[in-house]
Amino acid sequence: MVFAVMPVAQALSTDATLSALGAWSAQGGLSSPSLSPAFASNTYSYSATASSSTTTITVSPQTNWPNLSTIQVKIGNGAYSTVATSGTFSSNLNVGANIITIFVTAQDGITTLTYTYTVTRAAPASTDATLSTLTLSSGTLSPIFAGGTTSYTASTTSDSITVTPTVNQANATVQVKVNSGTYATVASGTASGSLALNMGAFNYVYVKVTPQDLSYVAPYVITVTRISTDATLQSLVLSWPGVLSPTFAAGTTTYTASVSSLTTSLTVTPAATDQTNATIQVKINGGTYATVVSWSASAALTLNAGTNTIYVNVTAQDGTTKLYTITVTRVSLAPTIGTATLAGQTNASVSWTASTGATSYTATSSPGGLTCTSASSPCTITGLTAGTTYTFSVTATNSDGTSLASAASNSVTTPAAIAPNAPTIDTATATRSTSATVSFTAPGSNGGAAITSYTATS
């Protein structure tokens, strides 16, 4: 018996589908379930997201006909690489979209399918903690702002400022505080709240930028000097015997004082309200200004006869000035009082010791303010009131002015009023058959009180 064996031809497969598509990363950021949509042989486009730390991707495509179909894989515009059955393809991931193309050729060598797998890697969190601009509401930064420069100085006369920081990277946050205060969040490009400033150079404004990755970065620091505008005095005193009129007040800038002709110089002791920053200069008349330290006396200021002007000029830290003036009049020395004596029922004689250079003297009663003026001692004050006790003082006058008053004299008391002396009769003249006119002279003494009427008797 003879057997014959006949070969039977089998058609080549045209199946180019995948049966599975696995994917993972060395960082564990991807696995098969991350495919979107879920894998299906007849779904040809997939996507997935990866964290910024996922730097590589591995894919494992499998076909329905292992060893009979061909798989080629590439990423982006790279070249295809053939992947063995149950093999893997690995590649680095760029930030952003990474398109992985899987090209499958069936056994017949003609039928092909293309699968795409787009993996989007998130960008790493930014570490940018720089500012693009930083401005102040008052004052100017020094040096000129630059994002990489973190230390600045500024000066202002304001008692508070605001700062406006703008971040360089949109996801960064910014906070601001002054000195030992609390940080407050500020929207990029907007002004902070008001930051109160102490007087002087010890104000530190901190601008802290936190980058997207939340890492700590040292803040920008602005050392702000608050410049004083205070040019007032808190005290101003003349050396004895000078006394200011009116009494000193910081807001009053014009004063007068009088001293005797024996006073040839004075000193002035000023004190600035802002003793740390203000400067004080003093001069008299047309002299030259000399600097004086607060609470210290100036050099002796020589007085001319007559009127002198002392200038006290205060300059604040910012250059603001305030001028105080004292007009000092050098007058005759007050006379030395002598004695007062009665010189009749209602008169008193007042004596004194002369003052050098005086041209006239005036004696004044107290009470009443009655006066007499004479070129020399004594002089008599008339018209005193009967039964009243008086004292008297004397001033001297020369071309420079009038001196201070002397001390009070001894007291004198005028006698109580009495009846006046009799008037002196003159003539009587008939004016009608039944009337006459009588004339008389007033008495030499009124008895210490004014005569109020006269009576003629036939």
Image (spheres, rainbow, N blue to C red):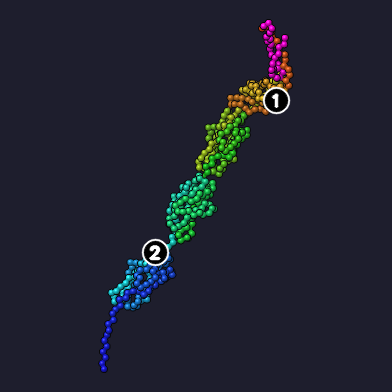
Q: Label 1 sits on what residue type?
A: Tyr
Question: Which residue carries the number 1 mark?
Answer: 390
Quadrant of res 417: top right
Q: Is residue 306 magenta?
A: no
Horizontal side, residue 261 vs residue 229: left or right:
right
Q: Is residue 446 magenta?
A: yes
The reply to whether residue 57 is in sight is no
Residue, x 39% and y 65% (percent of image)?
A: 120
Please give the label number shown on residue 95.
2
Residue, x 58% and y 37% (percent of image)?
A: 249
Q: Nearer the viewer, residue 300 or 411?
A: 411
Residue 222 placement (x, y as % from top left): 49, 51
Give the CA separation, mark 1 to mark 2. Answer: 111 Å
The reply to whether residue 77 is in sight is yes
The quarter of the rendered structure image containing the N terminus is bottom left
Q: Nearer the viewer, residue 354 or 52?
A: 52
The quarter of the rendered structure image containing the C terminus is top right
Q: Label 2 sits on what residue type?
A: Val
Q: From the image, give the main secondary structure of the stretch colored magenta.
A: loop
Residue, x 32% and y 76% (percent of image)?
A: 15
Q: Residues within 10 Å of mark 1 (few under 14, many from 20)?
A: many
Horizontal side, residue 138 vs residue 358: left or right:
left
Residue 8 placement (x, y as % from top left): 27, 84
Give the magenta-colored segment's residue range.
432-458
Residue, x 40% and y 65% (percent of image)?
A: 121
Q: Secondary structure at mark 2?
A: loop
- Residue farthest along the front direction in this orientation: 434
Residue 170 placement (x, y as % from top left): 43, 57
Please count the marks in the image: 2
Q: Secondary structure at mark 1?
A: strand
